[in-house]
Amino acid sequence: MGIPIKLKSIRQITRIASGLRRAGKRIVFTNGCFDILHVGHVRVLSEAKSLGDVLVVGLNRDISVKSLKGSGRPVTGEKERAEVISALTAVDYVVFFKEKTPERLIRAVRPDTLVKGGDWDKKNMVGAEFVESYGGQVKPLRFVKGHSTTNLIERIKKISE
């Protein structure tokens, strides 16, 4: 299929976000590896979208996933992960980042609302202090118990034994 149209560079999303703010649109930002998409991801992204007009998803590049999750990850390459995330109606834009954290991307987007899944508390959310510094909101969303990529990988390993 090629590069998803929702996939933008940091430079592009900076311009887009600026225009959206001028138009009075509320920008929501979240990020993750989204290595094997599961219902927990879908629910978090849908809830995140409900908090504003536009949802921007920061997507860890493969090198970033590997440094965070270990040598066996990612299971799915970054281009395929971007294509899958872009296919979700809740997602408006996808932007890669190669660093361990999305701090630089959050500063570029300047979202009205920063969200993460409920396994993150507000004080540990990267970018929270910055977003709150200009009046933005920081919201950990409900955790979807029993749904994680790590759990899926473990279940698949057990099945294949």
Image: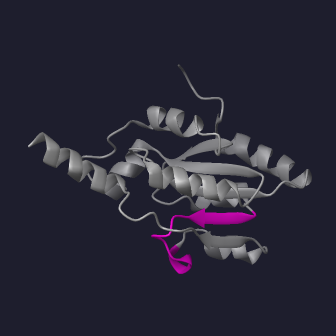
Give how far across and how far down residue 61 sits, in percent. 46, 44
> What is the image's colouring?
one colour
Question: Farthest residue toward the left?
Answer: 161
- Whether residue 33 appears in this view of the structure is no
- Whether residue 7 appears in this view of the structure is yes
* Residue 120 drawn in magenta: yes
Say which quarter of the image contains residue 127: bottom right
Question: Farthest residue toward the top?
Answer: 1
Q: Is residue 12 left or right of residue 85?
A: right
Q: Is residue 70 left or right of residue 61?
A: left
> Which range of residues does the magenta coloring cover?
112-124
Residue at left 75%, top 57%?
Answer: 52
User: Of residues 65 and 86, which is closer to you in this image?
Assistant: 86
Residue at left 58%, top 34%?
Answer: 87
Say which quarter of the image contains residue 44: bottom right
Give how far across and how far down residue 161 sits, in percent. 8, 43
Residue at left 60%, top 44%?
Answer: 95
